[in-house]
Image: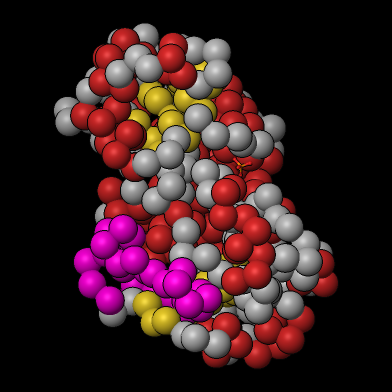
Amino acid sequence: MAIKHFLQFNDLNREELEYVFERARWIKSQFKAYQQYWPLQDRTLVMIFEKASTRTRLSFEAGMQQLGGSAIYLNTRDSQLGRGEPVEDAAQVISRMSDIVMIRTYEQEIIERFAANSRVPVVNGLTNEYHPCQILADIFTFIEHRGPIQGKTVAWIGDSNNVCNTWLQAAEVLDFNVHVSTPPGYEVEAERANLYGNDHYEEFADPMEAARNAHLVTTDVWTSMGFEAENEERMVDFADWQVDGDMMKVAAKDALFMHCLPAHRGEEVAAEVIDGAQSVVWDEAENRLHVQKALMEYLLLGRVK
Ligand code: CP
Ligand code: NVA
């Protein structure tokens, strides 16, 4: 059987995504009912972190344990990865000792090279270009609250970063629209986002116009990990791209607010929004656990029903 990786969102097609969401729903319900479900007994997940994390580490590690398996955490600081061992060699070795690998790193190229030399499935836990597990959780959260996302409009306010690129890919696979507003100079790079075309997103100079009538308003930090040197300049450039109460007012009446977290209140989002009634950020964070359990089950066992 060919190994299946999840390196970018469009590595799964619509049918597969619908299956994963359905499994996530069931796995979540079992978990909430304290029902033991150990399909990955004796399986080992290796998690490699070259950048910081709270949610991704916790959800993968707890998730693997809850499925009956175990998880091993490696970081660049205290493994040979930080001392120049070629990624291809690391992939050969790590994938002989484990059943599935999750990587959080810098350039997408690194994870692609790892996957090309891996004997086991590789999952992207965030790269400079993409954050597919995040959008899996976000869309699952949208569906839980509002039903199918097909035909809906998502407003992305802020940086056209890894999370934005992944929303754009997801829009193509699941057939919804993204209205993007970034400051000048930070526009979507379609090639970097690896899109099939440009018919599922529209760019707006004015963030209020992007948010208008949207069913979901979402944003992320102005400065992503790895771009810290640009922080001061970005604080100035992004000052008008804060999701605040006025912006939520022009969105659809029942619009949701999401943020992958960690958030900076008073920068990309006002406290009244992230802590307000339309915000579903805690469900969104929790759902990382459930969708990633479903994802690991799918990548390791295929369809179980
Ligand atoms: N959203 C997210 O990936 O959070 P962490 O950086 O804490 O893993
Ligand atoms: N865009 C952010 C997401 C953090 C989860 C980053 O890459 O730092």
Seen at 29% across and 27% down, the residue is 114
Q: Please name whichever residue, 294 or 133, is drawn nearer the observer in this view of the structure.
A: 133
Seen at 32% across and 34% down, the residue is 110
Write down the quadrant of residue 86 in the picture: top left
Q: Position of residue 197 (x, y in %)?
A: 23, 72
Q: Position of residue 297 (x, y in %)?
A: 41, 33
Q: Position of residue 152 (x, y in %)?
A: 46, 79
Q: Note whether 288 is above or below 54 in the view shown.
A: below
Q: Which residues are magenta?
A: 171-198
Residue 270 visible here: yes
Q: Position of residue 276 (x, y in %)?
A: 80, 70
The N terminus appears in which quarter of the rendering? top left
| In the image, residue 196 lies in the stretch drawn in magenta | yes
Q: How many dots with numbers?
A: 0
Using residue 135 as the reference point, say whether residue 55 is left or right of it: right
Using residue 40 as the reference point, say whether residue 266 is left or right of it: right
Using residue 263 as the reference point, say whether residue 209 is left or right of it: left
Q: Please name whichever residue, 93 or 276, is drawn nearer the observer in this view of the structure.
A: 93
Write down the quadrant of residue 150 in the picture: bottom left
Q: Please name whichever residue, 85 or 218, is drawn nearer the observer in this view of the structure.
A: 85
Q: Note whether 54 is above or below 71 in the view shown.
A: below
Residue 5 visible here: no
Q: Please name whichever residue, 147 or 270, is drawn nearer the observer in this view of the structure.
A: 270
